[in-house]
Image (cartoon, grey):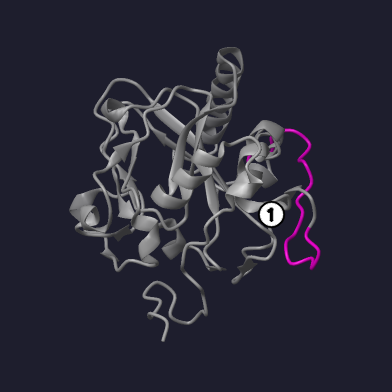
Amino acid sequence: MPPIDNAMPDLERRLEFTPASEDRAAKLSRQQVREYNEKGFVFPLEVFSPEEAIANRRYFDQLMEQAAQTGWNSYSINGWHQHCAGIHDLVTEPRILDYVQDLLGEDLVCWGTHYFCKMPGDGKRVSWHQDASYWPLTPSQTVTVWLAIDDADLENGAMQVVPGSHRHGQISFEPSAVEESNVLNQTVHGAEQYGGAPVAFAMKAGQISLHSDLLLHGSEPNHSQRRRCGLTMRFVPPQVRAHRGWNGRSVICRGRDPEGHWAHVPRPAGEQIPAKG
């Protein structure tokens, strides 16, 4: 009998890790695919040149300035690939898709994006959690690309992960306590018991990491005087099913969706900052 889904008991979801085939490896090495299957992540991977990384940062700086003028904060740029051409261009960047294709296959759908930007001295943390607990998707086969917009290290609140924790399926969590100052609202306690010692994703701007939606991860507050910003891009193969309308804002980035479950949002005409509710 499958375990009870303690995040969305009203939905039928299959929350278990699906290993990637090493035979598919082209951009990644077979060893990197093996590490993804065993640890739940692979990093750092080279994508953008230093000059391109500067351009990515300038783009975000301009976007954040426009967003702030409309009342949004540094965690609010969520799902804006449907509004902003620059984000749409990043989720369809062939160099990124080449890596993801080695894990998910030649048909790729991006259903979500989110800039996580910790400003200097930001007191918020991201408590230990699994992404799949938040998402009404089945099966749990999302690969998250985390693109470093700024250099990230432990001092400015780099993401940390628990290797091997993705192999436990869904892990029980509790609502986050107010004193945690959690950006999100779920907390897994005793995370280290589910895998190896935590690993920090120290990366240079322009590099990416890949991780499973079942991997336990989190990050500490940014106590430094340096910003730490990254863009998450969420990819699935088209056979994954979305509930609650979550298939309506997607982009078919490579290949096709034979059954037409996922929408295809066309590239926006420029940067259209959404109005704040």
Magenta: main secondary structure equals loop
Find the magenta span and give its range.
Answer: 257-273
Q: Position of residue 205 (x, y in %)?
A: 48, 22
* Residue 71 shows in the view: no
Is 268 one of the magenta-colored residues? yes
Residue 174: image quadrant is bottom left
Q: Going by the image, does 262 lie left or right of 212?
A: right
Is 117 one of the magenta-colored residues? no
Nearest the viewer among 91 and 38 is 38
Residue at 40% in and 76% down: 5
Nearest the viewer among 167 and 75 is 167
Please, is residue 80 above or below residue 117 in the view?
below
Q: Position of residue 19 (x, y in %)?
A: 52, 57
Please, is residue 242 above or below residue 155 in the view?
below
Please, is residue 39 above or below residue 48 in the view?
below
Q: Position of residue 262 (x, y in %)?
A: 72, 62
Query: Of the residues shown, which amino acid type is indicated by label 1?
Result: Ser
Residue identifier under label 1 = 250
Nearest the viewer among 188 and 164 is 164
Residue 159: image quadrant is top left
